[in-house]
Amino acid sequence: MPSANASRKGQEKPREIVDAAEDYAKERYGISSMIQSQEKPDRVLVRVKDLTVQKADDVVWVRARVHTSRAKGKQCFLVLRQQQFNVQALVAVGDHASKQMVKFAANINKESIVDIEGVVRKVHQKIGSCTQQDVELHVQKIYVISLAEPRLPLQLDDAIRPEVEGEEDGRATVNQDTRLDNRVIDLRTSTSQAIFRLQSGICHLFRETLINKGFVEIQTPKIISAASEGGANVFTVSYFKNNAYLAQSPQLYKQMCICADFEKVFCIGPVFRAEDSNTHRHLTEFVGLDIEMAFNYHYHEVVEEIADTLVQIFKGLQERFQTEIQTVNKQFPCEPFKFLEPTLRLEYCEALAMLREAGVEMDDEEDLSTPNEKLLGRLVKEKYDTDFYVLDKYPLAVRPFYTMPDPRNPKQSNSYDMFMRGEEILSGAQRIHDPQLLTERALHHGIDLEKIKAYIDSFRFGAPPHAGGGIAVGKGDDAVFRIA
Amino acid sequence: MPSANASRKGQEKPREIVDAAEDYAKERYGISSMIQSQEKPDRVLVRVKDLTVQKADDVVWVRARVHTSRAKGKQCFLVLRQQQFNVQALVAVGDHASKQMVKFAANINKESIVDIEGVVRKVHQKIGSCTQQDVELHVQKIYVISLAEPRLPLQLDDAIRPEVEGEEDGRATVNQDTRLDNRVIDLRTSTSQAIFRLQSGICHLFRETLINKGFVEIQTPKIISAASEGGANVFTVSYFKNNAYLAQSPQLYKQMCICADFEKVFCIGPVFRAEDSNTHRHLTEFVGLDIEMAFNYHYHEVVEEIADTLVQIFKGLQERFQTEIQTVNKQFPCEPFKFLEPTLRLEYCEALAMLREAGVEMDDEEDLSTPNEKLLGRLVKEKYDTDFYVLDKYPLAVRPFYTMPDPRNPKQSNSYDMFMRGEEILSGAQRIHDPQLLTERALHHGIDLEKIKAYIDSFRFGAPPHAGGGIAVGKGDDAVFRIA
């Protein structure tokens, strides 16, 4: 299939045309024609991560990107990259490679994808710059499968350099705008590959844990006919001759599923907030992980289930994604994440006392500001040695209308947030399951009852006590992934 | 905690007030005050499905809905329902229950949630109308936890009656509008409970299979800055001072992930189409299951991976969800689903020949109409005895601009649909990974290149050959779940 001469991209060839008659290796390299599924060759492509001493002296085919190339006399060293793995390859003038072939290899644009046939050779000195340190590939054939343009908008090695290191020694790093404008290349770095795998892993662990606990996954509508939850910060959609709105959360729907006897439900999906802010905590679109659950007598049954779900995610990441965590840590150094079992639960008044002792002035019914959240995170870490905790019993005044008041103290509520490293990651509460009280609280919040009629009506035919919570994952990473 | 007298809902009590002094059981029944997490009683609630002869003579607590009640002299029979399970309960005048208590039980509105203490008794004649056929519950205490309004907008027993049966014997069924207007109640039926569990199971099996195959789950943006894929049928969102659009599919983003070296990706999320039609195949919002995958030499590598994923889902449903399938079949009778391993793959020209032989007139480059899809499904079932097959090599003219043309025949393309019971469930293709050919094809389709610049640019720095496909799940069921 590969052909050195017939190519769509002939005009882009990075090599000089030399006298073909002299070239005894001319069939062994070149630019392949575009793969259009012309044929099904019986060729096995070996994965770069499987190139180890066990394969020493084997002849293998590998498909990978040209990460770097360096010509040196009659030789050319390539680093071949496949996802987060790389291996050194050598093209040297000899039986298999001609002078022209070495030159061809040396001139392949970085990030091009190549098919290489080569012999796996054990090396005597470890190759520190590659993940496959004990072998190199002695190239016998090399064909370009997809040619990259000659100038890369960013260098992958720059993109994984820790900011501080780059600043200190004057070496380049890549700024956020360049990354976002060239996201496809930025995502090829070992750090991005690891972050995306961790994000996929978090969703997988979340669902795996909940399915094992008997939860049912639901899909909730995103285009809705009335702005729910008060109507602020909602996006309007032109819906044929009318207007519709983008759901700000699956809150109402997951509660309706509880009223419909599913008992334990979760969903993962986009959430839309028309907040014109520029912080990593305020995005117009992010992915929400939502849980809702009926309980028997006390909402702490739900708090424990959610906290345990998060603990299972932390443990699963540490067990199954250690390599990815270490890869991210190389670029973004970080203390290991600490958590307790069972999870620490503090009441809001205890947190207030800790903050006041640290000199913060706050009212009893005041919400936590971002700086105070962070300070509290540090105080809790010092006192309890945990990066994860539940803050329980928030003031009723700072929570949504559907939050169950605390029967012992009308200024408190049966609501909670969960924190990681001093930032709120989940907000939840016991919900009001009584239509009469729900109506009173909605009126108190100035909400138009007509707009939430279907919601309130869903509690009129028997509703179990229930509680839940929502987590935002991938704030930041998804938004920047957008074509913009 | 339960109290017969102090109740928020005192005015709604369904029982007559009789002389309390005479009532020796007055502490044993009543309407509980709203559960606001006042206390954490040490009480274990037994699941209805666990009420079997193994528990005979045990005293248990159960929380369930009152499905039906029937008073008969000094006795009242209740059917207690918990999700898809139910059990008979008996309140009879005697040591534990007074005349007043029996009357109270008989008057509890259907769908109310109750806490019952009772003795599990083995019955001598099976109770055919309940899932728990070998036992009944002899009630000692009964408290209403959440009271339903007296008039139900639909009866659950009507809602699970097969259409034909209802028509034949004059018994009631429930029409679609009533179901949608009272979705919370409609979802409580055994059929709806099973459908939602099956839908959750499909998503779980899809992800489980793909994670095991080494795929990475991604989240793609829904609010986008330019109408991609041609711009027809796209919803406009007011985005602060500008307009934005709702993504019609994750197509461009999942391909960009392939260019970013993830090799195998999938996503599950909402897809938006501004199609003003009223068929179950055209919805403005549905949940898409999307796959994209780099391949080595031939897109059939991807076709096999996707077909195998679907086969794993079919098998998983048959193995793990047999009860749910049977429950749905009771209301919607259906032949068992048949499939082959490996999956049958037909070429479009073969399908045309089969249709023509059956008397259909079609051009070589014409797409399949819905009636022809269904007819083909029947012809394939007769000939090959399968409800699932792949139709390969569609005419290029009927596929999107990014579809790879067939190099052997310029009127064909490397594209495929997958069919279940004569309906297309997945559409896919090898995609063009060469920016020059992609530009040519976009221009041929009259697409504004400026709007897809970021997409085309993502192929400029080395792109592997790749293919994929998208499935729609829950068309119909999600939309009707909307507050409307």
Image (cartoon, coloured by chain):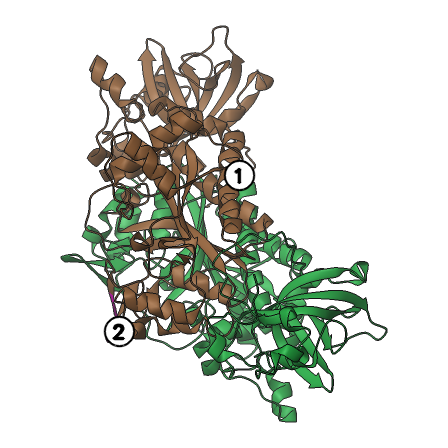
Chain colours: A brown, B green
State the residue at coordinates (32%, 56%).
B401
- List the residue tagged with mark 1: A312
Q: Which quarter of the figure is the N terminus of chain A placed in?
A: top left
Identify the residue at horizontal 68%, vertical 56% (top origin).
Answer: B319
Outermost residue on the bottom side: it is B170
Subunit of label 2: A
**Which of the 4 quarters of the picture holds residue A346?**
top left
* Residue A286 in sight in this render: yes
Asked which secondary structure carries label 2, the reply is loop
Provide the residue designation for mark 2: A240
Q: Residue furthest left?
A: B241
Classified by dominant secondary structure, the portion drawn in magenta counts as strand
**Where does the image place residue B109, in percent across and percent down from the top left?**
56, 79
Mark 2 neighbour class, 10 Å CA radius: few under 14, some 14 to 19, many 20 or more: few
- A300 falls in the magenta region: no
In the image, residue A238 lies in the stretch drawn in magenta? yes
Whether residue A289 is visible here, answered yes or no, is no
Residue B87's disc number: none
